[in-house]
Image (tube, coloured by chain):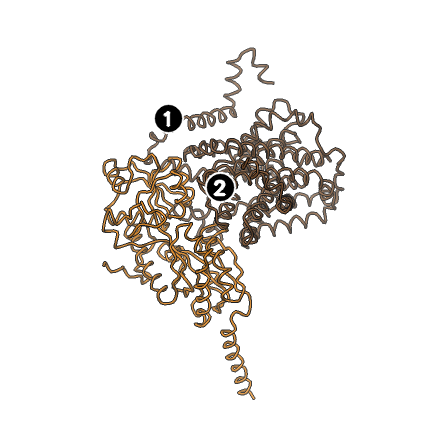
Chain colours: A orange, B brown
């Protein structure tokens, strides 16, 4: 009798879990957005998800969960059941949590459903700055040590990575790094002349460049960007950047590790389909993001490489709290 | 002609008109309930209106914004609980009026003055937006720092009674504001390694606790006393009242527009500065400030509604948000396929004039809804306290939770509520605490930015102040206001002015 009950129960469990994967989704899916309403991550996720819902044939209810540079949302999703009913919609920051002392979890505790798109960094200057391109800026820094004011957004932010890159390619720069709350306030300060140069993401600066309120110095990529074809890539000035580029912040959808493979596959397919929607493509293009749409092993590979490159860059720039080595993040091979 | 058409879009589409009306109506009530903030309402609307067209979505948001800024004054006057941070100053003279049974008059004046301030803000947005935006851009970190110091000097006018207690309260607020991860370096400050402190203390939670819970606890002392009957015969203020306060309201509206247009400062600081300004320039109020002076209502209410128009100035001309709500609206424009930035006015001038039209419309709706619902609203204060007090507590808890969906915020709110109760009991003013929390970040971040920009050299820092006209004016204002609060000032004035001193003293 006991054995029969045990057998029956386990049969029910097995069939239930099979049914769950086949019929997925049978209920509403929660989408936890790491950042606040109307931020870049929020905009990207809210515009792609309705199209993904269509492909999936289910409902995804999105909710913003902010705080702790996104760590609160990440920990929340990691703590839920790994059944594909809670998605994490995030950006690149979690890959830096460990070395920044912001938490002990990152995307290695997750499976990437889809890495949607990547942003391109660009170096912009106040229109009255006494130089017009990247080379001019470097000359100016050499001639006037400690005079150039460079915007920053705190350790781990895009400007800190770009500044770290410049430092490791060109050698230490003698500049004043002025910290702001985010690239929005810093670009405002740039237009008001409080800072001279700011590394920003292309999408945030593009309207200001179009209006002549700021001037582009170089795109931080290996090739020119179709949005700003006249702006030279930084590799034109110094080949050394090829080691680190292309690099950029990215957006992706994740589920906790342990989620059944077929559920992940269904979600990946849905998001891949959703990301092809012309409205979404246009929105991403307007904001200067490059579409990626990768998943599976390719995405995991991308994340690992991104983490290696960036954490070690920050480590070498002396911006980390703990060495990447402590977390088993290997130094990238110089290629 | 195109401009006019774009401006009139809202008035010719009944559907859009209705959405603005609906938004304004909802805004008044969202604003009135402590804890439900306009920022929150607008961010919920972002997802709600995602699939809509851009005009209806923006119409609804503008309605909520305008109505919400005004709505905060309702509960400030009736219950001494500001519904929003920008209504803190309103409570100081509004509640004493309600206690005398003149809540109707107070709400009437507030409504008309909010309407007036709203129009000044919209007018400046429509006519001088690029100029104001250029001016706002000129503010350097050191100027923001000086502005924050100016704000801190308001402690004097916010503390009724002992100045020392006021300074203590202000300093406490500054310290509370500094808790959490430092936004510039992510270093933990004053967190004592507790996870509850790591994210910082939500300013809204402090405000709801200090004003909501502590007021409810205070009222428990008189739970048996009958409520004050409210006279609501004369709601619409007479023309002569409006005319009398017109000069002051124009001055405070200007303060509102400029503070609103500065990225990083909003209606809350504007209202407090306006209140302080009113206290300075009003020589003979009919009633002393803090006991129901009309000027004490006029100033903050004109300023915070004028700040709405002000906040749109950098948003429309530069794509830079003037405050938290316009930051979300910029996101909404992005989502709807527009590219907010300096080119928006050139690429899509229609959008600008549509927004101006929607603001005008929302302002008119605000006047209508503001003046009609008073009778019902005043009944709230006449409710038995045994019903009212639990209701306030419940709303406070819901409100504190809703800001970030965080239970920690509820704990902070309750903690500050009890603390605030004892502060009131021992005669410590609560206004300066909130002032301190608001200004803490502004002062701290900008002081550091300013000094870092000058290579941590005080000499260069002061050189910067003395060579920039804007900084110099702000610096002189700080010195002047500081000195005017010390005994040296009165003594110096007496000696310098001699006989004419008497007139000045008046």
Name the chain letter of the residue that bears numbered label 1: B
Distance in Å between CA atoms under marks 2 and 1: 39 Å
The image shows residue A245 at horizontal and vertical percentages of 29, 54
Q: Is residue A246 visible?
A: yes
* In-front residue for pair B281/B444: B281
Going by the picture, which residue comes out furthest to the top? B499
Label 1 element class: helix
Q: Is residue A9 above or below residue A24?
A: below
Mark sitting earlier along the chain (2/1): 2
Q: Is residue B477 above or below residue B48?
A: above
Q: Is residue B422 visible?
A: no
| Residue B95, numbered label | none
* In-front residue for pair B181/B417: B181
Q: Label 1 neighbourhood size at 10 Å, few (<14), some (14-19), many (20+)? A: few
Quarter of the figure with the C terminus of chain B: top right
Q: Residue at x 51, y 21 (%)?
A: B489
Q: Nearer the viewer, mark 2 or mark 1?
A: 2
The image shows residue A73 at horizontal and vertical percentages of 47, 58
Q: Is residue A84 above or below residue B184?
A: below
The image shows residue B492 at horizontal and vertical percentages of 50, 17
Q: Count of labels shown?
A: 2
Q: Are marks 2 and 1 on the same chain?
A: yes
> Dividing the picture into quarters, in which one does residue A324 lie?
bottom left
Q: Label 2 neighbourhood size at 10 Å, few (<14), some (14-19), many (20+)? A: few
The image shows residue A22 at horizontal and vertical percentages of 50, 74
The residue indicated by pointer 1 is: B467
Name the chain letter of the residue that bears numbered label 2: B
The residue indicated by pointer 2 is: B348
Label 2 element class: loop
> Dividing the picture into quarters, in which one does residue B464 lie?
top left
**Labelled pair 2, 1 in contact (Cβ < 8 Å):** no
Q: Residue at x 66, y 31 (%)?
A: B291
């Amino acid at each position: 009798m006991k054995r029969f009950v045990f057998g029956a129960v386990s049969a029910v469990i097995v069939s239930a879990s099979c049914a769950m994967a086949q019929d997925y989704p049978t209920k509403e899916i929660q989408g936890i957005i790491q950042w606040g309403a109307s931020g870049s991550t929020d905009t990207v996720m809210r515009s792609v998800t309705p199209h993904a819902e269509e492909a999936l044939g289910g409902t995804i209810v999105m909710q913003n969960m902010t705080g702790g540079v996104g760590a609160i949302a990440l920990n929340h999703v990691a703590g839920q059941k790994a059944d594909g009913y809670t998605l994490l919609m995030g950006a690149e920051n979690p890959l830096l949590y460990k070395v920044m002392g912001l938490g002990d979890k990152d995307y290695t505790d997750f499976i990437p459903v889809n890495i949607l798109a990547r942003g391109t960094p660009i170096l912009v200057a106040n229109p009255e700055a006494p130089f017009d391109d990247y080379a001019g800026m470097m000359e100016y820094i050499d001639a006037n040590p400690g005079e150039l004011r460079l915007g920053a957004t705190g350790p781990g932010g895009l400007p800190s990575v770009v500044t770290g890159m410049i430092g490791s390619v060109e050698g230490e720069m003698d500049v004043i790094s002025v910290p702001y709350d985010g690239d929005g306030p810093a670009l405002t300060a740039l237009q008001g002349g409080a800072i001279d140069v700011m590394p920003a993401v292309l999408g945030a600066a593009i309207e200001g460049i179009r209006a002549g309120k700021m001037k582009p110095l170089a795109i931080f990529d290996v090739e020119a960007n179709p949005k700003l074809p006249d702006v030279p890539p930084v590799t034109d000035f110094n080949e050394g950047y090829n080691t680190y580029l292309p690099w950029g912040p990215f957006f992706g959808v994740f589920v906790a590790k342990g989620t059944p493979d077929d559920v992940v596959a269904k979600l990946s397919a849905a998001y891949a389909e959703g990301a092809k929607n012309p409205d979404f493509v246009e929105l991403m293009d307007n904001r200067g993001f490059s579409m990626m749409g990768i998943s599976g092993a390719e995405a995991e590979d991308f994340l690992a490489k991104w983490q290696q490159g960036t954490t070690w860059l920050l480590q070498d720039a002396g911006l980390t709290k703990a060495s990447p080595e402590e977390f088993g993040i290997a130094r990238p091979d110089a290629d | 002609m195109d401009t006019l058409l774009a401006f009139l879009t809202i008035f010719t589409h009944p559907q859009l008109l209705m959405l603005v009306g609906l938004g304004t109506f909802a805004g008044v009530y969202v604003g009135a309930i402590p804890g439900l903030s306009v920022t929150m309402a607008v961010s919920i609307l972002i997802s709600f209106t995602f699939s809509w067209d851009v005009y209806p979505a923006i119409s609804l948001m503008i309605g909520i914004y305008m109505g919400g800024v005004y709505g905060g004054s309702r509960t400030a006057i009736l219950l001494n609980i500001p519904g929003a941070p920008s209504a803190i100053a309103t409570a100081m003279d509004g509640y004493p009026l309600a206690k005398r049974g003149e809540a109707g008059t107070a709400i009437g004046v507030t409504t008309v003055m909010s309407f007036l301030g709203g129009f000044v803000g919209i007018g400046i947005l429509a006519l001088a937006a690029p100029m104001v935006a250029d001016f706002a851009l000129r503010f350097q970190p050191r100027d923001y720092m000086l502005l924050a110091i100016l704000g801190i000097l308001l402690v004097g006018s916010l503390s009724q009674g002992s100045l020392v207690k006021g300074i203590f309260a202000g300093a406490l607020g500054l310290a509370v504001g500094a808790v959490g991860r430092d936004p510039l370096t992510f270093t933990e400050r004053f967190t004592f390694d507790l996870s509850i402190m790591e994210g910082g203390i939500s300013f809204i939670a402090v405000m709801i606790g200090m004003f909501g819970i502590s007021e409810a606890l205070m009222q428990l002392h008189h739970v048996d006393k009958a409520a004050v009957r409210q006279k609501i015969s004369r709601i619409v203020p007479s023309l002569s009242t409006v005319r009398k306060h017109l000069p002051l309201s124009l001055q405070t509206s200007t303060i509102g527009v400029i503070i609103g247009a500065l990225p990083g400062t909003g209606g809350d600081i504007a209202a407090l500065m306006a209140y302080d300004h009113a206290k300075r320039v009003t020589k003979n109020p009919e009633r002393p400030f803090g006991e129901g002076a009309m000027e004490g209502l006029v100033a903050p209410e004109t300023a915070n509604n004028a700040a709405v128009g002000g906040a749109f100035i950098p948003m429309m001309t530069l794509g830079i948000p003037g405050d938290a709500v316009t930051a979300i609206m910029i996101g909404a424009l992005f989502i709807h396929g527009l590219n907010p930035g300096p080119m928006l006015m050139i690429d899509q001038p229609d959008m600008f004039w549509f927004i101006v039209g929607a603001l005008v419309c929302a302002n008119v709706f605000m006047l209508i809804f503001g003046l009609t619902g008073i009778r019902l609203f005043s009944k709230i204060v006449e409710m038995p306290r045994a019903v009212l007090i639990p209701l306030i507590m419940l709303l406070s808890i819901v409100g504190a939770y809703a800001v970030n969906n965080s239970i920690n915020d509820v704990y902070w709110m309750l903690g500050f509520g009890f603390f605030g109760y004892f502060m009131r009991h021992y005669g410590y003013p609560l206004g300066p605490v909130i002032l301190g929390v608001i200004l803490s970040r502004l002062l701290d971040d900008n002081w550091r930015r300013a000094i870092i920009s000058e290579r941590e050299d005080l000499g260069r820092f002061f050189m910067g102040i003395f060579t920039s006209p804007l900084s110099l004016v702000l610096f002189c204002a700080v010195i002047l206001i500081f000195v005017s609060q010390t005994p040296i000032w009165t003594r110096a004035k007496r000696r310098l002015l001699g006989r004419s001193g008497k007139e000045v003293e008046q």
